[in-house]
Image: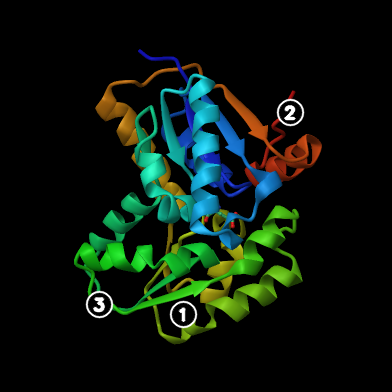
């Protein structure tokens, strides 16, 4: 039994989608969540900047006593994978488990991938899928407006979200993709708008859920499971603003951060 918390981190609210899924899988675990909202969006940063931010976030969490970390961020997983891998505690990301899941599918229809500009320009999702033997057509689209809208607390029902979804997802719908990877953890927050546009014909794969599952498996394989089900939230941004938006995203009041 290891009661130390796990650390789950992201540039902002996106990582909460991984927190939700991880809590569902392992409700007894203690969690420290860190959202670097003050420095979001990471998707507009260079790989060097992303690596530097990642090293700082991991150092903070390790100093806080976590037993393992999940980089609940596609942009970090694709641009600072080595920094995550070299963490002082066992670590996992959202890239590897997403690729493994997609590679396990027996289908030939095209795949859509949506993610941040930094993730799409790294080419890492596509590269890793090819390495894993995936031969299907891949349509990758960067969706920079999504994170800006989500970080400002705009709900998925807002007309601006609907317009942005139509703009970015059109080529993926047209291509008849049978699977769409939400390659940025923020996108799960607006998933109802995305699936409404795709009309239920496309399987939506969440990088967040894949990452949460990888963290659960990591704890089991390292034999470090245990806790009292407590979650503590930290942000580099405004605490009250974070409380409001995070509570809306999670569907319950997370309470004061202090
Ligand atoms: N949630 C992040 C991701 O999964 C990053 C969003 C951003 O800060 O641009 O890519």
- For residue 45, what is the image quadrant? bottom right
The mark total stands at 3
Residue for point 74% across, 37% down: 243
Percent across and percent down for residue 51 are 49, 47
Task: Give neighbour class at mark 3: few <14, some 14-19, many 20+ (Cα, 10 Å).
Answer: few
Q: Which residue is mark 3?
A: 108
Kindly tell me whether residue 54 is visible in this rendering: yes
Classify 16 as above or below 203. above
Residue for point 65% across, 32% down: 234
Task: Give neighbour class at mark 2: few <14, some 14-19, many 20+ (Cα, 10 Å).
Answer: few
Task: Give neighbour class at mark 1: few <14, some 14-19, many 20+ (Cα, 10 Å).
Answer: many
Secondary-structure class at tag 2: loop
Percent across and percent down for residue 6 are 46, 27
Q: Which residue is mark 1?
A: 172
Q: Are marks 2 and 1 in contact (CB under 8 Å)?
A: no
In-image side of 72 versus 12 (left or right):
left
* Gap in angstroms between the C-alphas marked 3 and 1: 15 Å
């Amino acid at each position: 039994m290891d009661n130390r918390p796990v650390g789950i981190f992201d540039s902002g609210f996106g990582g909460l989608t991984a927190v939700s899924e991880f809590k569902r899988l392992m409700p007894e675990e203690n969690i420290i969540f860190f959202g670097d909202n003050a420095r979001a969006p990471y998707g507009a940063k260079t790989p060097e900047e992303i690596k530097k931010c990642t090293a700082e976030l991991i150092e903070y969490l390790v100093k806080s006593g976590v037993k393992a970390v999940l980089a609940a961020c596609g942009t970090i997983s694709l641009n600072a994978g080595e920094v995550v891998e070299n963490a002082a505690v066992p670590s996992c990301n959202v890239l590897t488990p997403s690729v493994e899941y997609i590679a396990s599918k027996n289908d030939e229809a095209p795949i859509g991938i949506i993610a941040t500009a930094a993730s799409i320009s790294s080419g890492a999702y596509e590269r890793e899928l090819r390495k894993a033997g995936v031969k299907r057509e891949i349509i990758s689209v960067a969706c920079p407006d999504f994170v800006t809208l989500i970080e400002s607390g705009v709900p998925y029902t807002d007309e601006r979200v609907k317009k942005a979804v139509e703009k970015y997802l059109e080529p993926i719908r047209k291509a008849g993709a049978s699977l769409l990877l939400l390659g940025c953890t923020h996108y799960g927050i607006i998933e109802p708008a995305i699936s409404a546009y795709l009309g239920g014909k496309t399987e939506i794969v969440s990088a967040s859920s894949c990452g949460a599952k990888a963290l659960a498996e990591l704890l089991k394989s390292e034999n470090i499971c245990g806790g009292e089900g407590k979650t503590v939230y930290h942000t580099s941004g405004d605490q009250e603003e974070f409380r409001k938006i995070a509570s809306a995203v999670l569907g319950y009041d997370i309470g004061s951060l202090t």
